[in-house]
């Protein structure tokens, strides 16, 4: 091929690539909460393009999660989705970091009422929440409690067999971990979590994410599709703009 033809071919390819990029819609975010008359039009988990606009009615509220955090859009009127703000990537990285399974003494205040603390990590199994829990593949599973006073032993029992394990919190610790050998999720994913003293049971179901998405938008979609609503709400709240 002559040099002139080579240059022409390269230029044509570049223009085609530019044209493709120009016509490829960019994703602005994902709907993580929706309420009001238009909720059915903007269900949780729906992806929205950067240039998209949404039309809302009185009483509508749509929360969109983007790389810049969560944005609450309320009606009535037509609203541009792709508003920009400061990136929340650092916050996202801290919220989704996978620890070694060591106990930590953060996330609660001694003497404070239960529920006054916030779960610091998306992958902690929250002992106060029932329902589906999405977990990345790893060598340990961490459990979190909102209070740190006193030692506590929780019982996690399978709902389909007699398999059970003890989750033991030490005084001053907000988290306790089990290894994947102690709690093999492949054996059973549906459990009843019972608090100290045989209190009310929380029914939880573990769902493995393989691999876990490494950005907020894709993770929000994965959590929504798998029904891990408590984690989706935590992700939305912690990334609030």
Image: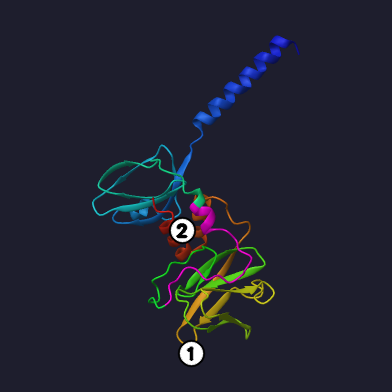
Q: Is residue 231 above or below residue 214?
A: below
Residue 108, position as x, y percentages in the image = 45, 71
Which residue is most to the right?
1
204 left or right, relative to 111? right
Q: Residue at x 64, y 65 (%)?
A: 100
User: Which residue is drawn at the image coordinates 49% and 53% (left, top)?
Assistant: 91
Residue 92 is inside the magenta segment? yes
Crowd class of label 2 (few under 14; some 14 to 19; many from 20; radius 10 Å): many
Residue 109, located in which quarter of the rendered image? Answer: bottom left
Residue 137 picture location, percent across and down: 64, 63
Q: In x, y percent, where is residue 38?
A: 31, 52
- Colour logic: rainbow
* Left or right: where 59 falls relative to 119: left
Cα distance, mark 2 to mark 1? 31 Å
* Helix, strand or loop status at disc 1: loop
Secondary structure state at the residue bearing disc 2: helix
Q: Residue at x 38, y 56 (%)?
A: 33
Label 1: which residue? 197
Tell me which label, 2 or 1, sits earlier in the chain. 1
Specify whether residue 18 is painted magenta.
no
* Residue beneath disc 2: 235
Of the pair 95 and 16, the residue shown nearer to us: 95
The dot on residue 42 is: none
Rendered position, 103 above or below 74: below
Please determine whether, in this image, residue 165 is positioned above or below residue 7. below
Q: Quadrant of the N terminus?
A: top right
Badge 1: few (under 14), some or many (20 or more) residues near its Cα, within 10 Å?
Answer: few
Decide if residue 185 is in sight here: yes
The magenta region covers 91-110
């Amino acid at each position: 091929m002559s040099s002139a033809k080579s240059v022409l071919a390269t230029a044509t390819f570049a223009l085609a690539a530019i044209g493709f990029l120009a016509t490829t819609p960019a994703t602005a975010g994902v709907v993580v909460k929706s309420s009001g008359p238009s909720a059915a039009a903007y269900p949780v988990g729906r992806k929205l393009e950067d240039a998209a606009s949404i039309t809302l009615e009185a009483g509508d509220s749509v929360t969109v999660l983007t790389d810049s955090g969560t944005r609450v859009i309320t009606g009535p009127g037509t609203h541009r989705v792709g508003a920009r703000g400061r990136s929340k990537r650092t916050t996202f990285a801290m919220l989704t970091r996978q620890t070694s399974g060591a106990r930590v003494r953060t996330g609660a205040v001694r003497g404070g009422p239960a529920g006054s603390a916030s779960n610091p990590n998306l992958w902690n199994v929250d002992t106060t929440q029932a329902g589906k829990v999405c977990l990345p593949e790893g060598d340990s599973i961490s459990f979190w409690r909102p209070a740190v006073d006193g030692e506590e032993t929780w019982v996690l029992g399978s709902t389909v067999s007699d398999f059970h394990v003890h989750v033991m919190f030490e005084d001053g610790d907000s988290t306790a971990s089990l290894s994947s050998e102690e709690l093999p999720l492949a054996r059973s994913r549906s459990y009843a979590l019972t608090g100290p003293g045989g209190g009310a049971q929380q029914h939880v179901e573990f769902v493995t994410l393989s691999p876990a998405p490494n950005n907020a938008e894709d993770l929000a979609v994965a959590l929504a599709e798998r029904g891990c609503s408590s984690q989706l709400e935590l992700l939305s709240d912690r990334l609030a703009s």
